[in-house]
Every structure is written in C-alpha cells, then in structure tokens.
Amino acid sequence: MGRYRTGSPGFACGSSQATINLSAQSPALPQFAPAAPPHVPLARVTRGDATDSIHYGSVAVVDRNGSLLFAAGDPHFLTTTRSALKPLQALPFVAGGGIERFGYSRQQTALLCASHSGEPRHVAGVADMLERAGCTPDELQCGVHPPLFYTVREELPPAGAKFTSLHHNCSGKHAGMLAYCSQRALPLESYLAFEHPLQQAIRTAVAHLTGVAESSLVAGIDGCSAPNYAVPLDRLAAAYARLAMATDDERYGEAPAKLASAMSAHPEMVSGEGRNDLILMRAGRGDWVTKVGAEGVQAIGVRSKGWGIALKVVDGNARGLHPATVAVLDLLGLLDAAQREALEAWREPVIRNYRGLVTGRVMPVVRLERRA
C-alpha cells in the first residue's frame, strides 16, 4: 500500500459526568481567532439592513498546468474533498474498461460520480449497474438514509417508508467500486479497506490528477464509509482542470474526459432536480463539469478555458457556498446574461421565516486577486 497520512483521531462523547468545568479543561484545546484568517469573507447574510452572519472561506483558480491564476483567502488551504473526489475515485474503473465490460450507459457513467437524490431514475440506474456486474444491493457498504429529494422538496418521507442502500446518495460510486472488484476478481467484502487493491488504485489516481504525492495525501473516512483525501485547495482545482480537458490524459487516457462529458451531459444523474450541480451544469451548456462536496466544497472544470476552480467555505455551510460559486463564475467572465438569469436565485437567495416573510438575503462578497 502506498504511504499516506491519516488525520487526527476522532473523539467520542460518552462521559457519565453531569457537568463540565470549562476552566479545568486542558490548555491543549485549540484556540480559534475571532474571524477566520487566512480566509476571507465569501458571503454575507443579512437580516433587514444588518449583518446576521458572515461565511468565510477561500478560492483557487488554476490553469491546466496547475498554475494559480486567481485566488481569495488561502488557495493552498488543506481541504477535505468529500464528494468532490468522486470523479477521481471512478478513474481506475473507467480507465480499466469497466464501462465497456458491463455495458454501462452514459447516464450510469455519470452515476459513478453522483451524490444523487434517490429519485426513481437514480435507484433504478444503480440497481441495474449492480446486476450487470453480478453484484447485489446487499453488498453495498455505503449505509442507508432517506432520499435527498425529500429535503429538496421540503417534505418528510411517508410514515413507515422503507429505504435501502440504493437510495444512499453515494450508491452509484459504490456500485462502480464493486464492479471494479468483480471485473478483477477482487474481494468484495473488504472493498472499502485502505489496503484493498481498489483503494490503492484510487489513491494513485487522486495523486496523479491533483499532483499531490501519495505520501502527502491526508486520509480520512467519508460519510459513506469510503476512504477520502484532503489536498490543498489549488490541487483540487488542478484536478478539475485536468478532468475537463478534451485531450487524453498521459496515464488514464480518455477516462477523465469520458467521465466529465457524461457528467455535463447528464447532470440530472449527478445530483437531482432542484440541486446545485444540476443547475450549474445545465447553465454551463456542456462547458462546465462540477461537483459539490459536503462541508462547503465546490470544484468546477471549465473546458473552454482549461481552468479549474475550487471553493471552500470553512464553516461548512452550503448557504454561503452557492452564492460565492456563482459570483466567482461571474467575476471570471464566464457568465452571459442568460446564465446570470438562470443562476440568479443561487447568487442571492432570499431567506424567509416559517410564515413565508422575507427576513434577509445571502449576498456574495467574494473578491478575487490576480496571481498569474
């Protein structure tokens, strides 16, 4: 197994103490600055004419060679990639002929990179992927959660509704991982183990596209139980610049372009109705490939420019991420009038209370500095 660094161990709460004396806590506890240097304000939340809160973060924009072109805050901030890593995690399977071997459609190729909403088309697509690979839903190790489309619709799941791992937003990624193992007669039950040949191949792909040595990748466990990696923000941007290239990659051939084109052609399979990856890629008209990640991460590849863009909101709140993303695209000259109109609700969303009254807005305040 390639060498890599793991993050700090997690902490579990389970003390029987009824009270905690804060003054007696260890002086080793981290101290946080009142603002968020070296990050900068990306979005401002208003209530009336007052500032209710500010979302801080950083932005990196690079060219296809990884050179930094524009930035805000700390473009080298070590960033957990979360679901923005999914296209890179699919590279070994696609480069190894997995799509052709199992006859996956372009929609199913997009599902390999998806944080889908658990809509019927998503569930059916993943179920078919598993069947074609000779696998079953019971072999998915992503866990179970209610479909995300209920959240988008602001609805509760029906009483007594039962869901399976197929509804998990990461089930397409996991189906691809199982298919990789099936194609190579690798163990299925341990496919998420760091030392598994699949995960070794994924680490190599992540290192290659980001330009970060395997020994410098900071490893962790994602919400779906798969290994995940943190890299500097500009390295995530560089990966998406390479992902969006129309030419073959020196190591993975046409696989990056095949994944990117499937995502931009079928953004409805990457996320779902009413969600930002779908809205952004539709607005991009085939020029943008993008993937959001949990805890305030967005990565975008721009084919026509050869650029990669990555944003991180350090408080992890997508409320600040989406307005900043649209503003960055506009600041870079990537939006025409029709695209601005299509993305306006994401650029400056209105905040309403439970009676439907407008109480404020989320307004982008990001500024980019030229670095090239």
Image: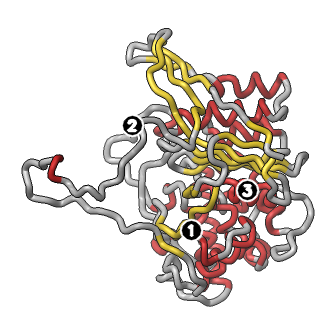
- Counting residues from the start of the chain, the first of labels 2 and 1 encountered is 2
Q: Are marks 3 and 1 in contact (CB under 8 Å)?
A: no
Where residue 372 appears, as percent x and y from the top left, is 84, 47
What is the number of the mark on residue 107?
A: 3
Q: Quadrant of residue 238?
A: bottom right
Measured as percent of width and height from the top left, residue 25 is found at: 19, 54
Q: Characterize the local packing of mark 1: few (<14), some (14-19) or many (20 or more) Cα atoms within 10 angstroms.
A: many
State whether residue 19 is above or below residue 49.
below
Q: Amino acid at mark 1?
A: His
Gap between marks 2 and 1, in whole Å? 26 Å
Residue 81 vs 188, above or below: the answer is above
Q: Secondary structure at mark 3?
A: helix
In this rendering, the count of numbered labels is 3
Q: Of the residues shown, which amino acid type is indicated by label 3?
A: Gln
Q: Is residue 141 left or right of residue 75?
A: left
Residue at 82%, 30% in the rendered image: 335
Residue 39 visible to an observer of this rendering: yes
The mark nearer the N terminus, 3 or 1, is 3
Q: Position of residue 325 (x, y in %)?
A: 67, 36
Using the image as rendered, state which of residue 217 and residue 241 is in the foreground: 217
Residue linked to disc 2: 156
In the shown orientation, is residue 272 left or right of residue 151? Answer: right
Q: Which mark is residue 174?
A: 1
Question: Are the residues flagged by discs 2 and 1 in contact, CB closer than 8 Å?
Answer: no
Q: Which mark is residue 323?
A: none
Q: How is the image coloured?
A: secondary structure
Amino acid residing under circle 2: Leu
